[in-house]
Image: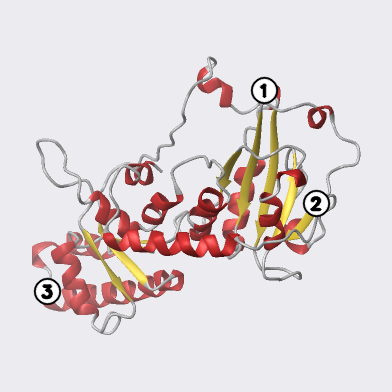
């Protein structure tokens, strides 16, 4: 969304700088010494597009090595991407496959040229039944990326369609810092901060609205499951929610997840129950509501902690949600150029 793009204009904290440096060092180690163990077998009879020199050669980086959910999400996006064939843009697709199905392994990449066939399913890639698709190891793929001769046309631009943490950070930085290829979107270093909701809060917390002061991010705080008494003393946690996050209902999020995974609104029934009881509510009725709220909070926290060690509490703000995408517009046809049904 828009928030990560703001992060690129901010100075990372010392902690984030250290994390970025460690990632860069790790990526340089990973990127050295790779040898090509499998060639990229292209069709023996090139199409007319393959025989001409393209105006731009694009590698679409797709998939997830860790999650079938994120693989299928990424696959859906990439399958419907604009390819701009009329402008003679050459497209390659590299799909990182998760360790799922009957063909697990240390890492596999499916390579497809020109477009992902409309009839090809994610399941066929995962179970190895897809036809006319070259599958190589991750190390072999990185070897291919380091030697232009293994592609019919040298890669000039990488467009990531990856939504898990490694895809948003490590893979972007691999392309940028190790292979020195231009990558669409903000830098991998910026994504290290932007992919972590708690880190994003810290970065955006430095900003001020003119004439208003602080307030760009909702009130809130983060906890870790490893914190002493994080799950044992929920009464103290609930008091903290009331003091630091605006009370209930409250949003609870897994800081490193995407696509609404590990996301919950907690306390809506509690707030409605208090409103219906009104000022005449008895102590027994209020205790019952508190007990139900405690049970709900424990249940939702258990789910959030399935996705990692941290949980982020944020003030719930009632209203409409606007999710915005940003397109750098240069084509004379305007946004119509990107509408469904065009030849692009």
Horizontal side of 303 relative to 14 (left or right) equals: right
Q: Nearer the viewer, mark 3 or mark 2?
A: 2
Element type where label 3 sits in the image: loop
Seen at 52% across and 39% down, the residue is: 184
Q: What color scheme is it?
A: secondary structure
Seen at 70% across and 25% down, the residue is: 88
The vertical placement of 287 against 144, above or below, is below
The C terminus sits in image quarter: top right
Q: Is residue 292 visible?
A: yes
Task: Specify which label sits upstream in the sequence, 1 or 2.
Answer: 1
The quadrant where residue 323 appears: top left
Task: Specify which label sits upstream in the sequence, 3 or 2.
Answer: 2
How far apart are the alpha carbons under marks 1 and 2?
A: 25 Å
x, y percentage for residue 252? Answer: 32, 63
Seen at 78% across and 26% down, the residue is: 52
The vertical placement of 40 against 183, above or below, is below
Seen as rendered, the residue at the extreme top is 332
Horizontal side of 7 relative to 110 (left or right) equals: left
Horizontal side of 237 relative to 163 (left or right) equals: left
Seen as rendered, the residue at the extreme right is 45
Observer-nearest of 245 and 20? 20
Task: Specify which label sits upstream in the sequence, 3 or 1.
Answer: 1
Tag shown at residue 87:
1
Tag shown at residue 282:
3
- Specify few, some or many for label 1: CA neighbours under 10 Å numbering under 14, 14-19, or 20 or more: few
Observer-nearest of 198 and 37? 37
Tag shown at residue 133:
2
The vertical placement of 328 against 103, above or below, is above
x, y percentage for residue 303? Answer: 42, 71
The quadrant where residue 244 appears: bottom left
x, y percentage for residue 50? Answer: 80, 32
How far apart are the alpha carbons under marks 3 and 1?
A: 72 Å
């Amino acid at each position: 969304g828009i928030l990560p793009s703001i992060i690129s204009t901010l100075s990372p904290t010392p902690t984030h700088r250290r994390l970025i440096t460690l990632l860069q060092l790790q990526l340089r180690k990973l990127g050295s010494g790779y040898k090509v163990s499998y060639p990229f077998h292209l069709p023996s009879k090139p199409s007319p597009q393959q025989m001409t020199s393209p105006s731009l050669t694009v590698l679409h980086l797709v998939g997830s090595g860790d999650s079938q959910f994120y693989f299928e999400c990424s696959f859906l996006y990439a399958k419907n991407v604009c390819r701009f064939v009329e402008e003679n843009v050459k497209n390659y697709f590299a799909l990182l496959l998760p360790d799922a199905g009957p063909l697990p392994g240390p890492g596999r990449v499916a390579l497809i040229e020109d477009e992902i066939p409309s009839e090809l399913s994610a399941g066929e890639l995962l179970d190895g039944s897809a036809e006319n698709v070259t599958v190589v190891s991750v190390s072999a793929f990185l070897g291919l990326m380091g030697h232009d001769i293994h592609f019919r046309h040298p890669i000039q631009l990488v467009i990531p369609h990856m939504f898990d943490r490694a895809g948003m950070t490590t893979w972007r930085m691999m392309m940028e810092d190790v292979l020195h290829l231009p990558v669409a979107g903000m830098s991998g270093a910026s994504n290290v901060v932007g992919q972590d909701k708690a880190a994003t809060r810290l970065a955006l917390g430095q900003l001020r609205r003119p004439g208003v002061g602080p307030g760009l991010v909702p009130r809130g705080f983060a906890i870790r499951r490893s914190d002493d008494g994080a799950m044992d003393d929920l009464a103290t946690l609930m008091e903290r929610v009331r003091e630091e996050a605006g009370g209930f209902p409250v949003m609870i999020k897994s800081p490193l997840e995407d696509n609404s995974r590990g996301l919950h609104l907690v306390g809506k029934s509690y707030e409605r129950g208090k409103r219906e009881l009104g000022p005449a509510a008895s102590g027994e009725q209020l205790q019952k509501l508190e007990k139900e709220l405690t049970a709900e909070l424990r249940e939702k926290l258990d789910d959030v902690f399935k996705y990692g060690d941290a949980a982020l509490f944020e003030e719930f703000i009632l209203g409409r949600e606007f999710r915005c995408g940003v397109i750098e517009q240069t084509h004379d046809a305007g946004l119509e150029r990107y509408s469904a049904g065009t030849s692009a």
